[in-house]
Amino acid sequence: MKKISNYIAGKHCEPHNNEYIDNVDPATGEVYSLIPNSSSEDIEKAVLASQEAFPLWSSMGIEKRSAILMNVADKIESRLEEFITAESKDNGKPLSLARNVDIPRAISNFRFFATSILHFSSESHYMEGVGINYTTRKPIGIVGCISPWNLPLYLFSWKIAPALAAGNCVIAKPSEVTPYTAYLLSTVLEEAGVPAGVLNIVHGLGTKSGDAIVKHPKIKAISFTGGTQTGAYIAKTAAPMFKKLSLELGGKNPNIIFADCDFDEMLKTTVRSSFANQGQICLCGSRILIEKSIYQKFKLAFIEKLKRHKVSFPTDPESRMGAVVSKGHMQKVLSCIELAKKEGGEVIFGGNQIKMSAPYDNGFYIEPTVIEGLPYNCKTNQEEIFGPVVTIMPFETEEEAIQIANSTEYGLATTIWSNDLKRAHRVADTVHAGIIWINAWLIRDLRTPFGGVKSSGVGREGGWEALRFFTEPKNIFIKH
Ligand code: NAD
């Protein structure tokens, strides 16, 4: 069986304790590779390698650093099919999604930050008759990047690329549930010219290797994407060491649909925003709020569309939804559906596990599920499910829609459907969210700030925000 290795100090290596954990193919339920269960000794080794590499990497001219990161993007692209297949197999997502979204975006992340750094400039503030301030922005040193399983290489590279572009050395840990494309990334680094020790990829459990990254005193910043509870633990652990923290956490996003929207466009996009990647995108809209006058029309049309929304094994070209990421996650999602029923919700579409035929009969498939009849403040409408489950709720007024939208502890993204632009702007201005789409979903410009408010996180990724996070400003004043 394939054993994935850590990549530390420019070398592929076994974990210090020689322990491995199973990596399961969600489409079949079979263990298909083994992942290092790394410990604090491996993190220590990575820190030493980073310390050694930092002087060279941080003082390298930005053109050279940029060229190396462009090489990384090119190397991934030259092995495109291998990365696409690996991502789909590791995560259970349709191959088409890995081909159209995950891997192209990972490549773009490297190219985007490789070129951004060439334009990232420092500020100066002139004080008339007094003097001048200029602000330098230096890399922080060694930083930790910890990412989740839903968009594995996409989110891993979204952190690593700006951290490296800014001149830091990185200790990165992908999710233990989906480690494979991070491992593949480690196989292109040397060829791309990334010096040894600059990017160390350490695999393992969050509570062990992730925790060791968060606790290491020499790792000065942590960029984390994952669950809100994990984020809270990381914040509590890192705070006494005054580490810089960027936390991208959970969500319970509202999708607010007004009667005057472009119905067909809204319907098509709402199917995607509900069930893309099996509903396992932090930006998916899991609470669909519909203006009462079109509630019945929406409900019937949505269900009609879902009847043709094929759930199948990831390599089926017709598959619109693949397997959810793990058995544990499947059980969690199914238990959320049971809870919704206990809370008085009616499952009007889906609601069940799907048994595929062999060899996919032990895979983790769930029907796209739609629930109605629940109050906005019940657990199902307040807590993140992170699977192919949405609730639908009618509203009568704009105020009511905003009140429901803002009723959760989360504030990541909101989608608004209306052709009344004044109203769309008003609602956008009032809802608690870091990211709003009006008459669209998941259109991303990598220059824009990305992140949430309330329990959805602290800080922003993307564009200059990411480069600012991964650098430390120093203001210098000179008197006239
Ligand atoms: P998770 O919090 O369980 O794990 C995320 C990462 O943190 C993994 O690499 C894991 O190994 C590591 N980890 C776990 N415990 C740790 C600890 N104690 N110390 C250090 N590291 C630890 O989340 P997940 O289940 O992998 O991902 C799903 C969650 O991620 C959902 O809540 C989803 O909303 C969120 N998410 C948020 C965004 C965003 O941009 N806001 C994007 C994608 C996913």
Image (cartoon, grey):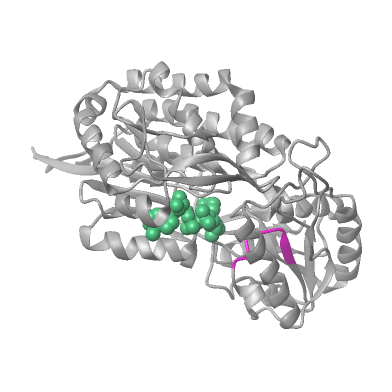
* Looking at the image, residue 22 lies above or below residue 193: below
Residue occupying image coordinates x 64% and y 38% = 89
Magenta highlight range: 384-390
Q: From this viewpoint, is residue 208 visible?
A: yes
- Farthest left residue? 479
Quarter of the image where one finds residue 93? top right
Give the side of residue 109 with respect to residue 88, left or right.
left
* Looking at the image, residue 261 lies above or below residue 289: above
Quarter of the picture containing the C terminus is top left
Task: Locate residue 85, reporting x and y percent.
Answer: 65, 31
Quarter of the picture containing the N terminus is top right
Task: Locate residue 284, reporting x and y percent.
Answer: 65, 55
Give the side of residue 469 with respect to residue 381, left or right.
left
Residue occupying image coordinates x 79% and y 78% = 373
Which residue is at the front of the view, 148 or 269?
148
Give the side of residue 253 with respect to residue 20, left or right.
right
Task: Locate residue 154, reporting x and y percent.
Answer: 54, 39
Residue occupying image coordinates x 72% and y 63% = 389
Does the stretch in magenta take in 454?
A: no
